[in-house]
Image (spheres, helix red, strand yellow):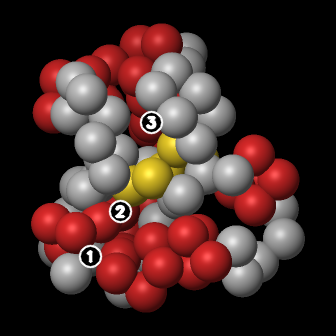
Amino acid sequence: MVANRRNGAVYTGVTSNLVQRVWQHKESTFPGFSKRYGCKLLVWFEMHETMEAAIAREKQIKGGSRKKKKLALIEVDNPTWQDLYEDIT
């Protein structure tokens, strides 16, 4: 998940190349939600063995309330909403 600030706009997506995709968010290379709201901070991620598993998990996260799903996941693993991009590069 990428965000624009703590408790701000949060974008959830799936990718097969996390480093490249976060860089694209940081550079605002594609139009859409994350560019419009300035979501450039990698605040949470989860790795999966298959793309099918990743997509199923993304749907699960997006399916519930914002507070229960997205914010709770971020707060447990990254309570300060630190940008995790440097940790993956």
Identify the element where label 2 is drawn. Answer: helix
68 on left or right of 11: left
- Amino acid at dot 2: Ala
Mark 1 and mark 2 residues within 8 Å of each other at the beta carbon: yes
Question: Label for residue 61?
Answer: 3
C-alpha span from label 3 to label 1: 17 Å
Kind of residue sitting beneath label 3: Ile
Determine crowd level at label 3: few under 14, some 14-19, many 20+ residues with C-alpha closer than 10 A.
Answer: some
- How far is the residue under mark 1 from the one under mark 2? 6 Å
Q: Residues within 10 Å of mark 2 (few under 14, many from 20)?
A: some
Please, what is the three-letter code of the amino acid marked with disc 1? Thr
**Circle 1 Cα neighbour tier, 10 Å, few/some/many (<14 / 14–19 / ≥20):** few
Disc ID at residue 54 = 2
Q: Nearer the viewer, residue 5 or 48?
A: 5
Q: Dot 1 lies on which element?
A: loop
Between discs 2 and 3, the one toward the N terminus: 2
- Distance, label 2 to label 3, CA atoms, is 11 Å
Residue 7, x across and y down, in percent: 51, 21
**Residue 87 on image: x %, y %:** 15, 66
Give the side of residue 59 with respect to residue 30, left or right. left
Residue at the spot of label 1: 50
Indicate which disc, 3 or 1, sits on the residue closer to the N terminus.
1
Quadrant in the picture for the C terminus? bottom left
Foreground of the two, 64 or 22: 22
For image coordinates 28% across by 42% down, the residue present is 82
Q: Position of residue 49 (x, y in %)?
A: 17, 73
Look at 62% across and 77% down and name the residue there.
27
Q: Assign a secondary structure to mark 3.
A: helix
Say which mark, if any, is on residue 60. Answer: none
Q: In the rendered view, tell whether residue 52 sits above or below residue 82.
A: below
* Residue depth check, mark 3 versus mark 1: number of the one nearer the observer: 3
Q: Residue shown at 69%/52% (left/top)? A: 38
